[in-house]
Amino acid sequence: MKQAPSSDARNTSDPTTLHTLGDAFNAAGADFAQLVRARVRSSETWDMHQVNFRRWLSHESLQGGEIGIALLDEEMLSSLALRELRGRRTMSDGTIKPICNSTLSKRLSTMRLCCHAGKRRRWIARLPEFPVTPYRRRPGCTYLRSKDELALLCSSLIPDRADCTRSLLASPGSLKPLSWARKSSCPSAMVQAERSVPGDSPESPGTDDDLETRE
């Protein structure tokens, strides 16, 4: 994994500059690599964090990653979030297109990853409060028409979530909606299994469930 820039010339008399944001990102990378090897997280997710971190480094206040991780407080995070929310992409009419809250939330997750890595190593005494970025999810619907499609869906998931999804959707008998997060640790996706009543479907009377996932 790529390493974030770090400085060799630090003011060791000041504890707030002993460990930088770049150090925390590198430490987060080491922690994340263990999760990738354990097949709990994917390398593609870390690639996203690397892109996000490079975007954060464009802010002058972060000094190219050389700012002390202990200096990253609520006030600075709020200021960074507001500036990031303004966007970077220039439209054809010359205006800057702001980013949506869901994109900002993903970018803030990279900073949160750094703070957690620093906290685990006792480089900071407490985790700062991050800005709240509420956003509305817009789920789409995908209908699984067979157990082969269920197997294809499960093959794209990490093992523990694949096992849970498989058990929820493959076993008949449950009429209740069941929540499961496909891409995150919080319930952001809805997996719903409904048994079809015999005779309802002319193509498959009395067969297994109509399986519906909302991503």
Image (cartoon, grey):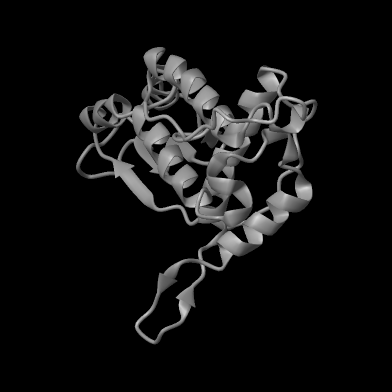
Give the quadrant of residue 130: top right
- 137, 176: nearer the viewer: 137
Looking at the picture, does residue 11 appear above or below residue 96? above
- 3, 134: nearer the viewer: 3
Image coordinates of residue 15 in percent, x first then y, are: 76, 27
Image coordinates of residue 42 in percent, x first then y, are: 38, 27
Can the viewer see residue 61 in this picture?
yes
Who's the residue at 58% across and 29% down the image? Answer: 24
Can the viewer see residue 195 in this picture?
no
Image coordinates of residue 22 in percent, x first then y, are: 54, 34
Q: Quadrant of the C terminus?
A: top left
Who's the residue at 50% across and 64% down the image? Answer: 99
Image coordinates of residue 172 in percent, x first then y, are: 41, 23
Looking at the picture, does residue 214 appear above or below residue 114? below
Number of numbered markers: 0
Who's the residue at 40% across and 75% down the image? Answer: 90
View extreme (bottom): residue: 93
Task: Answer with left or right where residue 72 lies relative to residue 156.
Answer: right
Looking at the picture, does residue 85 appear above or below residue 66? below
Task: Answer with left or right where residue 86 lies relative to residue 115.
Answer: left
Q: Quadrant of the N terminus?
A: top left
- 202, 161: nearer the viewer: 161
- 44, 202: nearer the viewer: 44
Who's the residue at 76% across and 42% down the image? Answer: 129
